[in-house]
Image: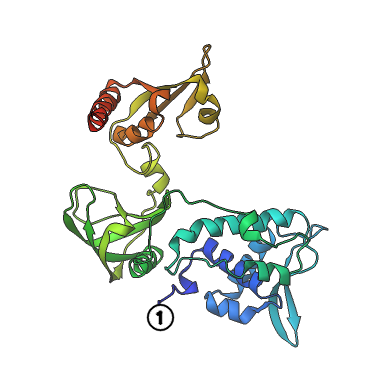
Amino acid sequence: MKKRLSPSHLTHGQKLASILLRLINAPSGVSVADLRGDYSLEERTFRNYIRDLQNIPSLVDENGGPLVVKEKENGVAYLRLKTGVIGDGTAEFFASFYMASSLMSYLAGTGMHLPLDNWEKTLRKNRLKFPVNHLDKKIHSVAELPKDYSGKDEVLRIALRAVLDQRRVNITYKSASSGKTSRHDGFMPYTLMQYRFGLYVIGRSDGKQDGILTLSVDRIQKIAIRPEKFHYPSDYSPAAIHGDGWGIMRGGKLHHVEILFDASEEAYVMERKYHKSAKLRRLANGDVRLTMTVGALEQLVPWVLSWGYRARVVGPMELVETIKKEIAELAGKYRV
């Protein structure tokens, strides 16, 4: 039987989501004693969890009262999700929760996968004021080229445990670009990150000159948790590490990038957010200019090429020359 991460090792947000899911699946409620024991919560902390659940805007009844309530029955305290009084706003909450859960379907086969098989039955038990039939068809998510983690359950379980417990690990890792295998002993995993339906571990190793490393979970060949803990750095931020790059790759030098898109692509270009520094401008001839300041230019190449002739890089010249070289090599592949 596959091991599952103990509820006591979840983050605050994960515990809230887990408790809410249990309430949804238990119309009669869950005893306060069980919840406090399962999640290792002191009485004062548990009161804060109840308050946080009751403060979720969409979890209110038609009169604005909280749907999550604490009630006593035969001397036993229960936490319950009130039924039969759910207003229109709750439809949005369940829809968003269902969509978020369905987006995680690529983790099927691991302990992180949230099964959706019983959702319709559970929602019907709660007598919601909106129809829940065919929910898997009415609310649908498409994962764009998701990775397959069905054989990585143990690696993922250990990695997640180490991140949450702030425990060092020994990692054997195979590089996709070089094919070489390297060891990272005493690695300190700071973050488990999701990017384009793939999972990555961000951290650092003592004595390594590489600084912060981003390791793909599917290329971790071996991982073993160590007894010693590490101090979580207060000045660390995953958003800051990758904020200047394009995607998850980091580049030391920042470049001012300018790309022109044909007028025919105006609607598609304008409706997206590309980068925190990105600025879009419609030109007099209908074309769209995108400017931004980013690092790791090599990550931009496949994205620019995906637009075909409808996008042209104006600068920097380093990126222009790389694009020209790629196009020349691509043309060579199709010569008759």
Judge from the rendering whether residue 332 lies leftward or rightward of residue 91; answer left or right.
left
The C terminus, quarter of image: top left
Q: Which residue is mark 1?
A: 1
The way the protein has been coloured in the rendering is: rainbow
Amino acid identity at mark 1:
Met
Judge from the rendering whether residue 280 lies leftward or rightward of residue 22; answer left or right.
left
- Residue 69 seen in this snapshot: no
- Residue 88: image quadrant is bottom right
The N terminus, quarter of image: bottom left
Label 1 crowd bin: few (<14), some (14–19), many (20+), radius 10 Å: few
Name, please, the residue furthest toward the right: 63
Q: Secondary structure at mark 1?
A: loop
Whole-percent x and y of residue 159? Answer: 35, 64
Name, please, the residue furthest toward the top: 284
What number of labels is visible?
1
Q: Is residue 264 above or below residue 208?
A: above
Whole-percent x and y of residue 46? Answer: 61, 71
- Residue 222 seen in this snapshot: yes
- Residue 190: image quadrant is bottom left
User: In this view of the protein, which residue sits in the foreground, 212 or 114?
Assistant: 114
Name, please, the residue furthest toward the bottom: 74
Q: Residue at x 45, y 48 (%)?
A: 144
Judge from the rendering whether residue 266 lies leftward or rightward of residue 197; answer left or right.
right
User: In this view of the protein, which residue sits in the foreground, 265 or 6?
Assistant: 265
Whole-percent x and y of residue 99? Answer: 58, 55
Q: Residue at x 65, y 60 (%)?
A: 135
Q: Residue at x 27, y 65 (%)?
A: 169
Whole-percent x and y of residue 78? Answer: 69, 78
Q: Is residue 221 above or below residue 284?
A: below
User: In this view of the protein, which residue sits in the foreground, 49 or 142?
Assistant: 142
